[in-house]
Structure formats: C-alpha cells, structure tokens
Image: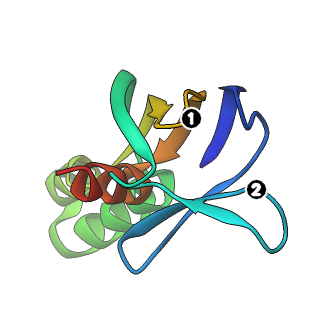
C-alpha cells in the first residue's frame, strides 16, 4: 500500500506528512504531490473494507455490554478503510498508477483543490 504500482516511478513509495503527500525517489529526494508538480489525477478504483481489528474489538465490547445484539451492533460499527488506485499525471509528462490509503488520497485531493 502507498506505492507506485505501474508507470513512471514504479516501485517507489508514497508517504503523507502533515497533510502533504510525497513520492520518495531516493533516500534524500522526494516529489511533493500537489498542484505544483501534478497536472491532474483520476481515481481508477476505490475499495472500502472493514478493519479486522476494529470489527473484533468493537464486537467484543458490544457483546460484553449488551450481549448478542451488542456483539452484532459493535461489529457493524467498525470503521471502513479505503484503498484507492489513482492515476497521477505529472506536469513533466510522466504518469504513475498508485495504490494508496485514505490519508494519502485525501492529502492529494486537498492539495489539488
């Protein structure tokens, strides 16, 4: 997760710090992913899934407090985690397909606004 899966920069990692996304080129060089370096972006695929530890934890607490109904309610209230596949078009003509989580995706979309 949080890496370039195809195209230019394939295999490079992506990180997010203080609301800004970065593409790590090398140990000392990175590209900030915002409107100064990106021409555009496009979502290819979005997948939501329940966080397994959240399902178990919430289910146990709900079951302890309210029995069977609480177990079901707690499990259903677990947080969704998003996985996104996004095409990045750089201003220098390069293209990358990335796979990222909610934090990185939100940082990119916010910086492109």
Q: Residue at x 67, y 64 (%)?
A: 30
C-alpha distance separating marks 2 and 1 = 14 Å
Residue furthest front in the image: 92
Q: Residue at x 29, y 51 (%)?
A: 75
| Residue 76, percent from left and from top | 22, 47
Colour scheme used in the picture?
Answer: rainbow
Q: Is residue 53 above or below residue 112?
A: below
Nearer to us in this view, 65 or 108: 108
Nearer to us in this view, 2 or 32: 32
| Residue 34, percent from left and from top | 38, 55
Q: Is residue 50 above or below residue 19?
A: above
Answer with left or right where residue 27 lies relative to residue 81: right
Callout 2: helix, strand or loop? loop
* Res. 31 image quadrant: bottom right
The total number of labels drawn is 2
Q: Is residue 91 above or below residue 56?
A: above
* Res. 96 image quadrant: top right
Callout 1: helix, strand or loop? strand
Nearer to us in this view, 113 or 52: 113
Residue named by callout 2? 25
Circle 2 Cα neighbour tier, 10 Å, few/some/many (<14 / 14–19 / ≥20): some
Counting residues from the N terminus, which is met first, the one under dot 2 or under dot 1? 2
Residue furthest bottom in the image: 18
| Residue 68, percent from left and from top | 22, 53
* Residue 49 seen in the figure: no
| Residue 33, percent from left and from top | 46, 54
Answer with left or right where residue 29 lies relative to residue 31: right
Residue named by callout 1? 98
* Residue 82 seen in the figure: yes
Q: Residue at x 32, y 51 (%)?
A: 35
Query: Can you say which quadrant of the picture contains the N terminus?
Result: top right
Q: Residue at x 39, y 60 (%)?
A: 103
């Amino acid at each position: 997760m949080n890496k370039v899966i195809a195209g230019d920069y394939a295999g490079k990692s992506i990180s997010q710090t203080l609301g800004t996304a970065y593409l790590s080129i090398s140990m000392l060089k990175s590209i900030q992913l915002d409107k100064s370096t990106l021409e555009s972006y496009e979502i290819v695929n979005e997948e939501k899934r329940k966080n397994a530890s959240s399902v178990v934890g919430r289910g146990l607490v709900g079951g302890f407090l309210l029995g069977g109904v609480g177990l079901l309610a707690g499990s259903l209230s677990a947080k969704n985690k998003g996985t996104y596949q996004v095409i990045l078009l750089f201003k220098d003509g390069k293209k990358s397909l990335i796979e990222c989580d909610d934090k990185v995706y939100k940082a990119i979309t916010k910086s492109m606004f």
